[in-house]
Image (cartoon, rainbow, N blue to C red):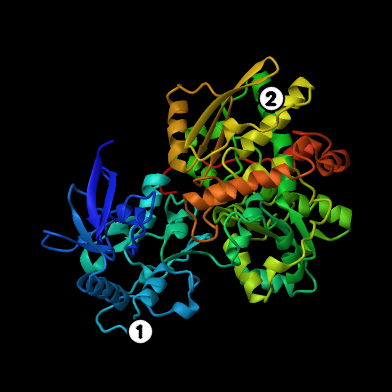
Amino acid sequence: MKMINLTIDNQKVAVEAGTTILEAARKVGVKIPTLCYLKDLNVIGACRICMVEVQGARTFIPSCVAPVAEGMVVRTNTPAVIAARKLVLELILSDHPMECLTCLRNQNCELQDLAKEFGITEVRFDGAKTEYPIDDSSPSIIRDPRKCVLCRRCMSVCTNVQTVQALCAENRGFDTLIAPAFNEKLANMECVNCGQCSLVCPTGAIVERDDTAKVWAALADPKKHVVVQTAPATRVQLGEAVGAEPGSIFTGQMVAGLRRLGFDKVFDTDFTADLTILEEGNELLQRVTTGGTLPMITSCSPGWIKFCEHFYPDLLAHLSTCKSPQQMFGALAKTYYAKKAGIDPADIYCVSIMPCTAKKYECRRPEMNSSGYQDVDVVLTSRELGRMFIQAGLDTTNLPEEEYDEPLGISTGAGEIFGASGGVMEAALRTVYEVVTGQTLENIDFEVCRGLTGVKEATVQVGDLSVKVAITNGLGNARKVLDKIRAGEADYHFIEVMCCPGGCIGGGGSPIPTNTEIRLKRIDATYTEDERMVLRKSHENPAVTALYEEFLEKPLGHKSHELLHTHYTPRGVNK
Protein backbone atom coordinates (compact mmCIF):
# COMPACT_ATOMS: atom_id res chain seq x y z
CA MET A 1 0.00 0.00 0.00
CA LYS A 2 1.39 3.39 -1.00
CA MET A 3 2.23 5.64 1.94
CA ILE A 4 1.54 9.38 1.94
CA ASN A 5 3.73 11.83 3.87
CA LEU A 6 2.25 15.02 5.28
CA THR A 7 2.60 17.44 8.17
CA ILE A 8 -0.16 18.04 10.74
CA ASP A 9 0.41 20.78 13.31
CA ASN A 10 4.18 20.55 12.72
CA GLN A 11 4.19 16.75 13.18
CA LYS A 12 5.44 14.54 10.36
CA VAL A 13 2.87 11.86 9.52
CA ALA A 14 2.93 8.86 7.15
CA VAL A 15 -0.39 7.18 6.38
CA GLU A 16 -1.86 4.93 3.73
CA ALA A 17 -3.19 6.49 0.55
CA GLY A 18 -6.91 7.14 0.80
CA THR A 19 -6.76 8.07 4.49
CA THR A 20 -8.68 11.22 5.35
CA ILE A 21 -7.10 14.18 7.11
CA LEU A 22 -9.31 13.46 10.13
CA GLU A 23 -8.08 9.86 10.36
CA ALA A 24 -4.46 10.92 9.88
CA ALA A 25 -4.77 13.51 12.65
CA ARG A 26 -6.18 10.94 15.05
CA LYS A 27 -3.21 8.66 14.38
CA VAL A 28 -0.91 11.28 15.91
CA GLY A 29 -3.20 12.23 18.77
CA VAL A 30 -4.63 15.41 17.27
CA LYS A 31 -8.32 15.79 18.05
CA ILE A 32 -10.47 17.48 15.43
CA PRO A 33 -14.08 18.04 16.56
CA THR A 34 -16.84 16.38 14.53
CA LEU A 35 -20.62 16.24 14.51
CA CYS A 36 -21.85 14.52 11.34
CA TYR A 37 -18.90 12.11 11.13
CA LEU A 38 -19.28 8.59 12.49
CA LYS A 39 -16.80 5.82 11.80
CA ASP A 40 -18.15 2.91 9.72
CA LEU A 41 -20.93 5.05 8.17
CA ASN A 42 -20.91 6.84 4.83
CA VAL A 43 -19.60 10.35 5.45
CA ILE A 44 -20.64 13.40 3.40
CA GLY A 45 -19.05 16.27 5.33
CA ALA A 46 -22.38 17.91 6.04
CA CYS A 47 -21.71 19.93 9.20
CA ARG A 48 -18.26 21.48 8.55
CA ILE A 49 -17.34 21.39 12.25
CA CYS A 50 -14.18 19.47 11.32
CA MET A 51 -12.72 22.19 9.09
CA VAL A 52 -8.94 22.54 8.91
CA GLU A 53 -6.50 24.85 7.16
CA VAL A 54 -4.47 23.29 4.34
CA GLN A 55 -1.53 25.25 3.03
CA GLY A 56 -2.25 26.45 -0.49
CA ALA A 57 -6.03 25.85 -0.32
CA ARG A 58 -8.28 28.84 -0.89
CA THR A 59 -10.82 27.80 1.75
CA PHE A 60 -10.97 25.68 4.88
CA ILE A 61 -11.28 21.95 4.16
CA PRO A 62 -13.69 19.48 5.85
CA SER A 63 -11.20 16.96 7.22
CA CYS A 64 -13.65 14.03 7.47
CA VAL A 65 -13.99 13.72 3.68
CA ALA A 66 -10.73 15.17 2.38
CA PRO A 67 -8.04 12.58 1.52
CA VAL A 68 -4.42 13.26 2.38
CA ALA A 69 -1.95 14.22 -0.35
CA GLU A 70 1.82 13.97 -0.57
CA GLY A 71 3.52 16.93 1.09
CA MET A 72 0.27 18.34 2.45
CA VAL A 73 0.66 20.79 5.35
CA VAL A 74 -2.34 20.89 7.67
CA ARG A 75 -3.10 23.18 10.60
CA THR A 76 -6.01 22.18 12.82
CA ASN A 77 -6.03 24.74 15.61
CA THR A 78 -5.24 28.20 14.27
CA PRO A 79 -7.34 31.09 15.61
CA ALA A 80 -9.05 31.43 12.23
CA VAL A 81 -9.99 27.70 12.14
CA ILE A 82 -11.32 27.78 15.68
CA ALA A 83 -13.36 30.92 14.96
CA ALA A 84 -14.82 29.35 11.81
CA ARG A 85 -15.84 26.18 13.66
CA LYS A 86 -17.43 28.21 16.42
CA LEU A 87 -19.37 30.26 13.86
CA VAL A 88 -20.70 27.08 12.20
CA LEU A 89 -21.70 25.70 15.58
CA GLU A 90 -23.51 28.91 16.52
CA LEU A 91 -25.43 28.83 13.24
CA ILE A 92 -26.51 25.23 13.92
CA LEU A 93 -27.58 26.20 17.44
CA SER A 94 -29.56 29.18 16.12
CA ASP A 95 -32.01 26.73 14.55
CA HIS A 96 -32.08 24.30 17.47
CA PRO A 97 -34.72 24.26 20.22
CA MET A 98 -33.17 25.07 23.58
CA GLU A 99 -34.86 22.20 25.40
CA CYS A 100 -31.80 20.46 26.79
CA LEU A 101 -33.18 20.06 30.31
CA THR A 102 -36.23 18.16 29.03
CA CYS A 103 -34.53 16.19 26.26
CA LEU A 104 -33.88 12.44 26.61
CA ARG A 105 -30.35 13.04 25.33
CA ASN A 106 -29.50 15.65 27.98
CA GLN A 107 -25.87 15.12 29.04
CA ASN A 108 -25.43 12.50 26.32
CA CYS A 109 -25.69 14.80 23.30
CA GLU A 110 -22.86 15.51 20.89
CA LEU A 111 -24.19 18.97 20.05
CA GLN A 112 -24.38 19.85 23.75
CA ASP A 113 -20.83 18.59 24.26
CA LEU A 114 -19.53 20.72 21.38
CA ALA A 115 -21.25 23.84 22.74
CA LYS A 116 -19.49 23.26 26.05
CA GLU A 117 -16.17 22.52 24.36
CA PHE A 118 -16.31 25.77 22.39
CA GLY A 119 -17.42 27.79 25.39
CA ILE A 120 -20.67 28.93 23.82
CA THR A 121 -22.80 30.64 26.47
CA GLU A 122 -25.13 32.53 24.15
CA VAL A 123 -26.33 32.32 20.56
CA ARG A 124 -25.70 35.54 18.69
CA PHE A 125 -28.04 34.81 15.81
CA ASP A 126 -31.77 35.17 16.17
CA GLY A 127 -33.48 34.23 12.93
CA ALA A 128 -36.14 31.91 11.55
CA LYS A 129 -36.46 28.43 13.02
CA THR A 130 -37.69 25.30 11.32
CA GLU A 131 -40.97 24.10 12.76
CA TYR A 132 -42.06 20.54 12.18
CA PRO A 133 -44.46 18.40 14.21
CA ILE A 134 -43.12 15.51 16.28
CA ASP A 135 -43.77 12.12 14.69
CA ASP A 136 -44.85 9.78 17.48
CA SER A 137 -46.70 7.32 15.23
CA SER A 138 -44.23 4.49 15.77
CA PRO A 139 -44.51 2.25 18.84
CA SER A 140 -40.71 2.20 19.01
CA ILE A 141 -39.20 5.48 17.83
CA ILE A 142 -40.02 9.17 18.26
CA ARG A 143 -38.85 11.69 15.63
CA ASP A 144 -38.46 15.37 16.48
CA PRO A 145 -37.25 17.08 13.27
CA ARG A 146 -36.75 20.38 15.12
CA LYS A 147 -33.69 18.87 16.83
CA CYS A 148 -32.22 17.48 13.60
CA VAL A 149 -28.81 18.88 12.60
CA LEU A 150 -29.01 17.35 9.09
CA CYS A 151 -25.99 15.13 9.69
CA ARG A 152 -27.65 12.30 7.73
CA ARG A 153 -26.27 9.57 9.97
CA CYS A 154 -29.77 8.09 10.32
CA MET A 155 -30.17 8.00 6.55
CA SER A 156 -26.78 6.34 6.16
CA VAL A 157 -27.41 3.55 8.66
CA CYS A 158 -30.97 2.96 7.42
CA THR A 159 -29.96 2.88 3.73
CA ASN A 160 -26.42 1.55 3.65
CA VAL A 161 -26.30 -0.75 6.69
CA GLN A 162 -29.90 -1.91 7.07
CA THR A 163 -30.98 -1.38 3.42
CA VAL A 164 -34.48 -0.37 4.56
CA GLN A 165 -34.43 3.21 3.19
CA ALA A 166 -37.20 4.45 5.44
CA LEU A 167 -35.57 7.92 5.66
CA CYS A 168 -34.48 10.38 3.01
CA ALA A 169 -33.66 14.08 2.53
CA GLU A 170 -36.62 16.23 1.51
CA ASN A 171 -36.31 19.78 0.09
CA ARG A 172 -33.14 21.88 0.04
CA GLY A 173 -31.31 24.58 1.96
CA PHE A 174 -33.00 25.90 5.08
CA ASP A 175 -36.08 23.79 4.30
CA THR A 176 -34.17 20.48 4.22
CA LEU A 177 -35.95 17.77 6.20
CA ILE A 178 -34.71 14.27 7.04
CA ALA A 179 -37.86 12.15 7.12
CA PRO A 180 -39.75 9.34 5.41
CA ALA A 181 -40.55 10.14 1.79
CA PHE A 182 -43.10 12.96 1.40
CA ASN A 183 -42.84 13.47 5.19
CA GLU A 184 -45.05 10.43 5.75
CA LYS A 185 -45.53 9.06 9.26
CA LEU A 186 -42.87 6.52 10.20
CA ALA A 187 -45.49 3.96 11.21
CA ASN A 188 -46.85 4.00 7.66
CA MET A 189 -43.50 3.15 6.12
CA GLU A 190 -41.49 -0.05 5.82
CA CYS A 191 -39.54 0.95 8.96
CA VAL A 192 -38.63 -2.22 10.85
CA ASN A 193 -38.32 -0.44 14.22
CA CYS A 194 -34.69 -1.54 14.62
CA GLY A 195 -33.74 1.80 16.18
CA GLN A 196 -30.28 1.95 14.62
CA CYS A 197 -31.16 5.51 13.62
CA SER A 198 -31.63 6.44 17.28
CA LEU A 199 -28.31 4.80 18.12
CA VAL A 200 -26.36 7.03 15.71
CA CYS A 201 -28.32 10.29 16.04
CA PRO A 202 -26.02 12.87 17.71
CA THR A 203 -28.91 14.78 19.30
CA GLY A 204 -32.46 14.07 20.46
CA ALA A 205 -33.95 14.18 16.96
CA ILE A 206 -34.58 10.41 17.03
CA VAL A 207 -35.05 8.65 20.35
CA GLU A 208 -36.73 5.55 21.70
CA ARG A 209 -40.33 5.85 22.87
CA ASP A 210 -40.03 6.34 26.63
CA ASP A 211 -42.37 3.93 28.44
CA THR A 212 -40.88 4.33 31.92
CA ALA A 213 -43.97 6.17 33.20
CA LYS A 214 -46.08 3.07 32.50
CA VAL A 215 -43.71 0.92 34.54
CA TRP A 216 -43.54 3.38 37.45
CA ALA A 217 -47.35 3.40 37.52
CA ALA A 218 -47.55 -0.41 37.52
CA LEU A 219 -44.98 -0.65 40.32
CA ALA A 220 -47.05 1.77 42.38
CA ASP A 221 -50.30 -0.18 41.85
CA PRO A 222 -50.86 -2.58 44.78
CA LYS A 223 -53.27 -4.65 42.66
CA LYS A 224 -50.54 -5.48 40.12
CA HIS A 225 -48.10 -8.36 40.43
CA VAL A 226 -45.25 -6.88 38.38
CA VAL A 227 -42.68 -9.28 36.94
CA VAL A 228 -39.68 -8.38 34.83
CA GLN A 229 -37.54 -10.31 32.37
CA THR A 230 -34.07 -9.19 31.27
CA ALA A 231 -32.67 -10.02 27.82
CA PRO A 232 -29.29 -11.76 27.48
CA ALA A 233 -27.50 -8.66 26.16
CA THR A 234 -28.59 -6.48 29.08
CA ARG A 235 -26.10 -8.29 31.34
CA VAL A 236 -23.24 -6.73 29.40
CA GLN A 237 -24.91 -3.39 28.59
CA LEU A 238 -26.64 -2.04 31.69
CA GLY A 239 -23.41 -1.06 33.38
CA GLU A 240 -22.68 1.48 30.65
CA ALA A 241 -26.08 3.11 31.18
CA VAL A 242 -25.10 3.95 34.78
CA GLY A 243 -21.48 4.88 34.23
CA ALA A 244 -19.54 1.61 34.14
CA GLU A 245 -16.97 0.79 31.49
CA PRO A 246 -18.09 -0.91 28.24
CA GLY A 247 -17.91 -4.68 28.55
CA SER A 248 -18.73 -4.70 32.27
CA ILE A 249 -20.74 -7.73 33.38
CA PHE A 250 -23.63 -6.28 35.38
CA THR A 251 -25.90 -9.26 35.97
CA GLY A 252 -26.08 -9.41 39.76
CA GLN A 253 -26.22 -5.64 40.21
CA MET A 254 -29.00 -5.36 37.62
CA VAL A 255 -31.07 -7.99 39.43
CA ALA A 256 -30.52 -6.23 42.75
CA GLY A 257 -31.47 -2.88 41.25
CA LEU A 258 -34.68 -4.25 39.76
CA ARG A 259 -35.72 -5.61 43.16
CA ARG A 260 -35.11 -2.23 44.73
CA LEU A 261 -37.30 -0.60 42.11
CA GLY A 262 -40.12 -2.77 43.44
CA PHE A 263 -40.57 -5.63 40.97
CA ASP A 264 -42.29 -8.59 42.59
CA LYS A 265 -40.24 -11.12 40.63
CA VAL A 266 -37.05 -10.72 38.63
CA PHE A 267 -36.82 -13.34 35.89
CA ASP A 268 -34.44 -14.01 33.02
CA THR A 269 -35.20 -14.09 29.30
CA ASP A 270 -32.23 -16.46 29.06
CA PHE A 271 -34.63 -19.09 30.45
CA THR A 272 -36.87 -18.83 27.39
CA ALA A 273 -33.80 -18.54 25.16
CA ASP A 274 -33.00 -22.05 26.36
CA LEU A 275 -36.60 -23.01 25.70
CA THR A 276 -36.35 -21.54 22.20
CA ILE A 277 -33.41 -23.83 21.45
CA LEU A 278 -35.46 -26.89 22.40
CA GLU A 279 -38.38 -25.83 20.22
CA GLU A 280 -36.32 -24.46 17.33
CA GLY A 281 -33.85 -27.36 17.36
CA ASN A 282 -36.65 -29.90 17.18
CA GLU A 283 -38.34 -27.89 14.45
CA LEU A 284 -35.12 -27.97 12.42
CA LEU A 285 -34.75 -31.72 12.88
CA GLN A 286 -38.39 -32.21 11.88
CA ARG A 287 -37.89 -30.18 8.70
CA VAL A 288 -34.70 -32.05 7.80
CA THR A 289 -36.24 -35.49 8.33
CA THR A 290 -39.69 -34.84 6.83
CA GLY A 291 -38.79 -32.69 3.83
CA GLY A 292 -39.92 -29.40 5.34
CA THR A 293 -38.98 -25.97 4.02
CA LEU A 294 -35.23 -25.44 4.14
CA PRO A 295 -33.17 -23.56 4.97
CA MET A 296 -34.87 -22.72 8.24
CA ILE A 297 -34.18 -19.21 9.50
CA THR A 298 -34.21 -18.02 13.12
CA SER A 299 -37.09 -15.86 14.32
CA CYS A 300 -35.79 -14.25 17.53
CA SER A 301 -35.27 -10.76 16.11
CA PRO A 302 -38.51 -8.78 15.55
CA GLY A 303 -36.81 -6.18 13.35
CA TRP A 304 -35.63 -8.99 11.08
CA ILE A 305 -39.11 -10.53 11.04
CA LYS A 306 -40.69 -7.26 9.91
CA PHE A 307 -37.93 -6.78 7.32
CA CYS A 308 -38.75 -10.20 5.85
CA GLU A 309 -42.49 -9.44 5.91
CA HIS A 310 -41.90 -6.23 3.94
CA PHE A 311 -39.13 -7.13 1.52
CA TYR A 312 -39.15 -10.96 1.27
CA PRO A 313 -42.74 -12.06 1.93
CA ASP A 314 -42.23 -14.96 -0.49
CA LEU A 315 -39.64 -16.42 1.92
CA LEU A 316 -41.72 -16.33 5.11
CA ALA A 317 -42.13 -20.13 5.03
CA HIS A 318 -38.41 -20.38 5.73
CA LEU A 319 -38.78 -18.65 9.11
CA SER A 320 -38.98 -20.77 12.23
CA THR A 321 -42.47 -20.58 13.70
CA CYS A 322 -40.97 -20.07 17.17
CA LYS A 323 -41.81 -16.84 18.91
CA SER A 324 -38.90 -14.81 20.24
CA PRO A 325 -37.72 -15.61 23.79
CA GLN A 326 -39.36 -12.37 24.96
CA GLN A 327 -42.77 -13.44 23.73
CA MET A 328 -42.40 -17.04 24.89
CA PHE A 329 -41.69 -15.66 28.33
CA GLY A 330 -44.75 -13.40 28.29
CA ALA A 331 -47.04 -16.27 27.31
CA LEU A 332 -45.63 -18.49 30.07
CA ALA A 333 -45.69 -15.75 32.70
CA LYS A 334 -49.46 -15.45 32.35
CA THR A 335 -50.13 -19.19 32.11
CA TYR A 336 -47.52 -21.52 33.61
CA TYR A 337 -46.15 -19.08 36.20
CA ALA A 338 -49.60 -17.70 37.06
CA LYS A 339 -50.84 -21.24 37.75
CA LYS A 340 -47.80 -22.22 39.84
CA ALA A 341 -47.94 -19.01 41.88
CA GLY A 342 -51.74 -19.04 42.24
CA ILE A 343 -52.10 -15.56 40.73
CA ASP A 344 -54.85 -14.35 38.44
CA PRO A 345 -53.11 -13.66 35.10
CA ALA A 346 -55.20 -10.53 34.78
CA ASP A 347 -53.23 -9.13 37.71
CA ILE A 348 -49.80 -9.95 36.26
CA TYR A 349 -48.00 -7.05 34.61
CA CYS A 350 -45.10 -8.31 32.49
CA VAL A 351 -42.20 -5.95 31.78
CA SER A 352 -39.27 -6.71 29.45
CA ILE A 353 -35.83 -5.11 29.58
CA MET A 354 -34.38 -5.33 26.09
CA PRO A 355 -31.47 -3.89 24.08
CA CYS A 356 -34.00 -3.47 21.29
CA THR A 357 -36.54 -0.86 20.18
CA ALA A 358 -38.25 -3.36 17.84
CA LYS A 359 -39.36 -5.35 20.89
CA LYS A 360 -41.71 -2.47 21.71
CA TYR A 361 -43.39 -3.11 18.38
CA GLU A 362 -43.29 -6.89 18.77
CA CYS A 363 -45.15 -6.98 22.10
CA ARG A 364 -48.04 -5.10 20.49
CA ARG A 365 -48.43 -7.41 17.51
CA PRO A 366 -51.93 -8.94 17.51
CA GLU A 367 -50.47 -12.47 17.42
CA MET A 368 -48.82 -11.98 20.82
CA ASN A 369 -51.76 -12.65 23.12
CA SER A 370 -51.86 -16.44 23.34
CA SER A 371 -52.19 -16.26 27.14
CA GLY A 372 -55.57 -14.61 26.68
CA TYR A 373 -54.02 -11.23 27.47
CA GLN A 374 -51.30 -9.12 25.90
CA ASP A 375 -48.45 -11.45 26.81
CA VAL A 376 -45.84 -8.73 27.40
CA ASP A 377 -47.32 -5.49 28.67
CA VAL A 378 -44.43 -3.10 28.13
CA VAL A 379 -40.85 -3.13 26.89
CA LEU A 380 -38.08 -0.89 28.19
CA THR A 381 -34.75 -0.50 26.45
CA SER A 382 -31.44 -0.73 28.30
CA ARG A 383 -31.30 3.08 28.14
CA GLU A 384 -34.69 3.43 29.81
CA LEU A 385 -33.84 1.09 32.67
CA GLY A 386 -30.60 2.99 33.20
CA ARG A 387 -32.64 6.18 33.59
CA MET A 388 -34.97 4.48 36.06
CA PHE A 389 -32.04 3.40 38.22
CA ILE A 390 -30.73 6.96 38.22
CA GLN A 391 -34.18 8.43 38.97
CA ALA A 392 -34.51 6.07 41.93
CA GLY A 393 -31.18 7.24 43.31
CA LEU A 394 -29.68 3.76 43.15
CA ASP A 395 -25.92 3.36 43.14
CA THR A 396 -26.29 0.15 41.18
CA THR A 397 -22.60 -0.27 40.42
CA ASN A 398 -21.97 -0.84 44.13
CA LEU A 399 -25.02 -2.98 44.96
CA PRO A 400 -24.33 -6.51 46.25
CA GLU A 401 -25.02 -9.03 43.50
CA GLU A 402 -28.30 -10.95 43.69
CA GLU A 403 -29.71 -13.99 41.89
CA TYR A 404 -32.76 -14.24 39.63
CA ASP A 405 -35.99 -15.69 41.01
CA GLU A 406 -36.95 -19.27 40.23
CA PRO A 407 -38.21 -21.00 38.19
CA LEU A 408 -38.16 -18.56 35.25
CA GLY A 409 -34.79 -17.20 36.29
CA ILE A 410 -32.80 -20.39 35.80
CA SER A 411 -30.71 -20.33 32.62
CA THR A 412 -27.57 -21.57 30.91
CA GLY A 413 -24.62 -20.11 29.06
CA ALA A 414 -26.31 -21.13 25.82
CA GLY A 415 -29.16 -18.77 26.62
CA GLU A 416 -26.73 -15.98 27.47
CA ILE A 417 -24.88 -16.05 24.14
CA PHE A 418 -28.15 -15.31 22.30
CA GLY A 419 -27.13 -11.65 22.67
CA ALA A 420 -24.15 -11.89 20.32
CA SER A 421 -24.14 -12.54 16.59
CA GLY A 422 -23.73 -16.28 16.10
CA GLY A 423 -24.94 -17.05 19.61
CA VAL A 424 -28.28 -18.54 18.62
CA MET A 425 -26.56 -20.81 16.11
CA GLU A 426 -23.92 -21.90 18.61
CA ALA A 427 -26.53 -22.58 21.29
CA ALA A 428 -28.56 -24.62 18.82
CA LEU A 429 -25.55 -26.66 17.71
CA ARG A 430 -24.65 -27.49 21.33
CA THR A 431 -28.07 -29.04 21.78
CA VAL A 432 -28.76 -30.48 18.32
CA TYR A 433 -25.45 -32.37 18.34
CA GLU A 434 -26.24 -34.15 21.60
CA VAL A 435 -29.89 -34.78 20.74
CA VAL A 436 -28.99 -36.33 17.37
CA THR A 437 -25.92 -38.32 18.39
CA GLY A 438 -26.77 -39.15 21.99
CA GLN A 439 -23.15 -38.34 22.76
CA THR A 440 -21.61 -35.66 24.95
CA LEU A 441 -20.14 -32.80 22.95
CA GLU A 442 -16.51 -32.51 23.98
CA ASN A 443 -15.87 -28.96 22.78
CA ILE A 444 -18.96 -26.82 23.06
CA ASP A 445 -17.29 -23.62 21.86
CA PHE A 446 -18.13 -23.19 18.18
CA GLU A 447 -15.59 -20.46 17.38
CA VAL A 448 -16.68 -20.47 13.72
CA CYS A 449 -19.99 -18.87 14.79
CA ARG A 450 -18.40 -15.91 16.56
CA GLY A 451 -17.30 -12.44 15.50
CA LEU A 452 -18.58 -9.40 13.61
CA THR A 453 -18.15 -10.70 10.06
CA GLY A 454 -21.28 -9.77 8.12
CA VAL A 455 -21.94 -13.23 6.68
CA LYS A 456 -20.37 -16.37 8.19
CA GLU A 457 -20.73 -19.82 6.64
CA ALA A 458 -19.76 -23.23 8.01
CA THR A 459 -20.43 -26.94 7.75
CA VAL A 460 -20.75 -28.70 11.10
CA GLN A 461 -20.70 -32.48 11.37
CA VAL A 462 -23.56 -33.72 13.57
CA GLY A 463 -23.31 -37.50 13.59
CA ASP A 464 -23.84 -38.63 10.01
CA LEU A 465 -25.41 -35.30 9.03
CA SER A 466 -23.33 -32.47 7.60
CA VAL A 467 -25.23 -29.38 8.76
CA LYS A 468 -24.59 -26.34 6.56
CA VAL A 469 -25.19 -23.07 8.37
CA ALA A 470 -24.98 -19.34 7.74
CA ILE A 471 -24.93 -16.46 10.21
CA THR A 472 -25.66 -12.84 9.37
CA ASN A 473 -25.90 -9.63 11.37
CA GLY A 474 -27.26 -6.35 10.05
CA LEU A 475 -30.10 -6.42 7.56
CA GLY A 476 -27.91 -5.49 4.61
CA ASN A 477 -26.01 -8.73 5.16
CA ALA A 478 -29.26 -10.65 5.62
CA ARG A 479 -30.37 -9.35 2.23
CA LYS A 480 -27.31 -10.95 0.59
CA VAL A 481 -28.23 -14.39 1.96
CA LEU A 482 -31.94 -13.99 1.18
CA ASP A 483 -31.15 -13.09 -2.41
CA LYS A 484 -29.15 -16.34 -2.67
CA ILE A 485 -32.18 -18.28 -1.39
CA ARG A 486 -34.42 -16.58 -3.95
CA ALA A 487 -31.95 -17.43 -6.70
CA GLY A 488 -31.81 -21.07 -5.61
CA GLU A 489 -28.11 -20.76 -4.76
CA ALA A 490 -28.33 -21.43 -1.02
CA ASP A 491 -27.90 -25.02 0.18
CA TYR A 492 -27.92 -24.24 3.91
CA HIS A 493 -29.93 -26.13 6.49
CA PHE A 494 -30.08 -23.38 9.12
CA ILE A 495 -29.54 -19.61 9.04
CA GLU A 496 -29.25 -17.19 11.93
CA VAL A 497 -30.28 -13.61 11.21
CA MET A 498 -29.72 -10.79 13.69
CA CYS A 499 -31.30 -7.50 12.73
CA CYS A 500 -28.63 -5.28 14.28
CA PRO A 501 -24.87 -5.12 13.60
CA GLY A 502 -23.13 -7.37 16.12
CA GLY A 503 -26.44 -8.86 17.25
CA CYS A 504 -28.48 -7.74 20.25
CA ILE A 505 -25.40 -6.36 21.99
CA GLY A 506 -25.65 -3.59 19.35
CA GLY A 507 -29.44 -3.27 19.38
CA GLY A 508 -31.21 0.02 18.83
CA GLY A 509 -31.96 0.37 22.55
CA SER A 510 -28.33 -0.03 23.60
CA PRO A 511 -26.45 2.56 25.66
CA ILE A 512 -25.02 5.42 23.60
CA PRO A 513 -22.37 5.45 22.23
CA THR A 514 -22.30 2.06 20.55
CA ASN A 515 -19.50 1.52 18.04
CA THR A 516 -17.41 -1.37 16.75
CA GLU A 517 -14.97 -1.24 19.66
CA ILE A 518 -17.76 -1.24 22.23
CA ARG A 519 -19.61 -4.04 20.43
CA LEU A 520 -16.48 -6.20 20.62
CA LYS A 521 -16.11 -5.54 24.35
CA ARG A 522 -19.74 -6.53 24.94
CA ILE A 523 -19.26 -9.70 22.89
CA ASP A 524 -16.16 -10.64 24.88
CA ALA A 525 -18.10 -10.11 28.10
CA THR A 526 -20.94 -12.26 26.76
CA TYR A 527 -18.68 -15.26 26.23
CA THR A 528 -17.01 -14.65 29.58
CA GLU A 529 -20.44 -14.81 31.20
CA ASP A 530 -21.17 -18.03 29.29
CA GLU A 531 -17.93 -19.65 30.47
CA ARG A 532 -18.53 -18.86 34.13
CA MET A 533 -22.02 -20.38 34.19
CA VAL A 534 -22.48 -23.85 35.70
CA LEU A 535 -24.77 -25.04 32.89
CA ARG A 536 -23.87 -24.21 29.29
CA LYS A 537 -26.32 -26.26 27.19
CA SER A 538 -29.99 -25.40 26.83
CA HIS A 539 -31.26 -28.98 27.15
CA GLU A 540 -29.54 -29.23 30.55
CA ASN A 541 -31.65 -26.45 32.05
CA PRO A 542 -33.62 -28.21 34.85
CA ALA A 543 -36.33 -25.54 34.84
CA VAL A 544 -36.98 -26.13 31.14
CA THR A 545 -37.15 -29.88 31.79
CA ALA A 546 -39.66 -29.27 34.58
CA LEU A 547 -41.68 -26.97 32.34
CA TYR A 548 -42.17 -29.76 29.81
CA GLU A 549 -42.94 -32.35 32.49
CA GLU A 550 -45.45 -30.16 34.32
CA PHE A 551 -47.03 -28.13 31.55
CA LEU A 552 -45.90 -28.34 27.92
CA GLU A 553 -45.41 -32.13 27.71
CA LYS A 554 -42.96 -32.07 24.79
CA PRO A 555 -41.31 -29.82 22.19
CA LEU A 556 -43.59 -29.05 19.24
CA GLY A 557 -46.54 -30.49 21.18
CA HIS A 558 -50.05 -29.05 21.15
CA LYS A 559 -49.49 -26.77 24.14
CA SER A 560 -46.15 -25.60 22.78
CA HIS A 561 -47.68 -24.68 19.43
CA GLU A 562 -50.46 -22.83 21.19
CA LEU A 563 -48.19 -20.71 23.39
CA LEU A 564 -44.73 -20.67 21.85
CA HIS A 565 -45.25 -20.58 18.08
CA THR A 566 -46.75 -18.00 15.75
CA HIS A 567 -47.31 -16.98 12.12
CA TYR A 568 -46.19 -14.05 10.00
CA THR A 569 -47.84 -11.40 7.84
CA PRO A 570 -46.85 -10.67 4.23
CA ARG A 571 -46.75 -6.87 4.08
CA GLY A 572 -44.87 -5.71 1.01
CA VAL A 573 -43.42 -2.21 0.79
CA ASN A 574 -45.27 0.69 2.46
CA LYS A 575 -47.61 -1.57 4.43
Q: Please give the name of the residue rendered at 47% of the width and 66% of the height, measured from the top-left corner.
A: 136
Q: Is residue 360 left or right of residue 403?
A: left
According to the picture, the residue beneath numbered tag 1 turns out to be: 121
Vertical position of residue 116 compared to residue 325: above or below? below
Which numbered dot is residue 329? none
Vertical position of residue 230 compared to residue 297: above or below? below
Q: State the residue in front, 252 or 327.
A: 252
Q: Please give the name of the residue rendered at 67% of the width and 60% of the height, measured from the top-left corner.
A: 377
Residue 565, quarter of picture? top right
Farthest residue, direction top: 464
Q: Please give the name of the residue rendered at 31% of the width and 58% of the height, measured from the top-left corner.
A: 182
Vertical position of residue 384 compared to residue 326: above or below? below
Residue 285 point in image, percent of width and height: 69, 25
Q: State the residue in front, 415 or 333.
A: 415
Instruction: Give the residue type that dot 1 points to.
Output: Thr
Question: Dots 2 and 1: beta carbons under 8 Å?
Answer: no
Residue 294 point in image, percent of width and height: 57, 25
Foreground disc of the pair 2, 1: 1
Q: Please give the name of the residue rendered at 53% of the width and 65% of the height, measured from the top-left corner.
A: 209
Which numbered dot is residue 285? 2
Residue 540 point in image, percent of width and height: 80, 37
Query: Is residue 350 visible in the rendered structure shown here?
Result: no
Dot 2 surroundings within 10 Å: few (below 14), some, or many (20 or more)?
some
Query: Is residue 527 visible in the rendered structure shown here?
Result: yes
Dot 1 surroundings within 10 Å: few (below 14), some, or many (20 or more)?
few
Residue 536, quarter of picture? top right
Instruction: Give the residue type that dot 2 points to.
Output: Leu
Element class at badge 2: helix
